[in-house]
Image (cartoon, rainbow, N blue to C red):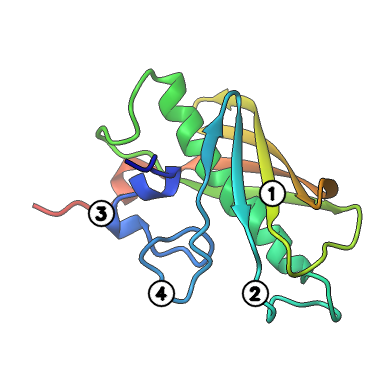
Amino acid sequence: MTKKAFQDYYPDDLSHCYGCGRLNDDGLKIKSYWDGEESVCIHEPRSYHTAIPGFVYGGMIASLIDCHGTGTAAAAKYRSEGREMDTDPPLRFLTASLHVDYLLPTPLGVPLEIRGRVKEVKGRKVIVESTLSANGKICARGEVVAIQVPEHLIPRHP
């Protein structure tokens, strides 16, 4: 049996994000998992995610860091509460702040590895630091400040 990604636990009503929504047919559908104390996502951008020939568009890099960060935030919050990700109430996070430093041009045509580390879990806020690597070289670093979606904004169906 295949291990479920963080994003696979999002309720259907909250699974339409362009970056990480499993129900967005046109989206990236990134998948994030725990790897010890770090989270990891492997994603290979398409040829149309280009900036200049052969290199990934910076907005794509930001999207990967962003959605991996919010997924990691949700998983970290469940962990901090000693809960499994399939328990109610569902925890979903949105971006309050995204900072990305581009360190090297990121090549197209190879899998990118995004690794996250939880810097802080405090109340409804989780801070995740990430690196994005290609061919073993760190091409970008980012930080996501993620805020838990208030329960009253999470759709409920009888």
Q: Position of residue 34 (x, y in %)?
A: 53, 33
Residue at image x 82%, y 46%?
136
Horizontal side of residue 39 vs 59, given as left or right: left
Most foreground residue, 105 or 102: 105
Q: Could you give the CA–CA distance between mark 1 and mark 3, rounded to whole angstroms?
A: 32 Å
Q: Could you give the CA–CA distance between mark 2 and mark 3, rounded to whole angstroms?
A: 33 Å
Q: Position of residue 11 (x, y in %)?
A: 29, 51
| Quadrant assignment for the N terminus | top left
On residue 25, which mark appears? 4
Which-is-in-front pick, marks 3 and 4? Answer: 4
Which-is-in-front pick, marks 2 and 4? Answer: 2
Mark 3 — residue? 155
Most foreground residue, 147 or 45: 45
Mark 1 — residue? 113
Counting residues from the start of the chain, the first of labels 1 and 2 encountered is 2
Q: Considering the numbered disc 4 on the image, is that residue within a helix, a strand or a loop?
A: loop
Q: Name the amino acid type tagged 3.
A: Pro
Q: Position of residue 146 (x, y in %)?
A: 57, 42
Q: Considering the numbered disc 1 on the image, is that residue within a helix, a strand or a loop?
A: strand
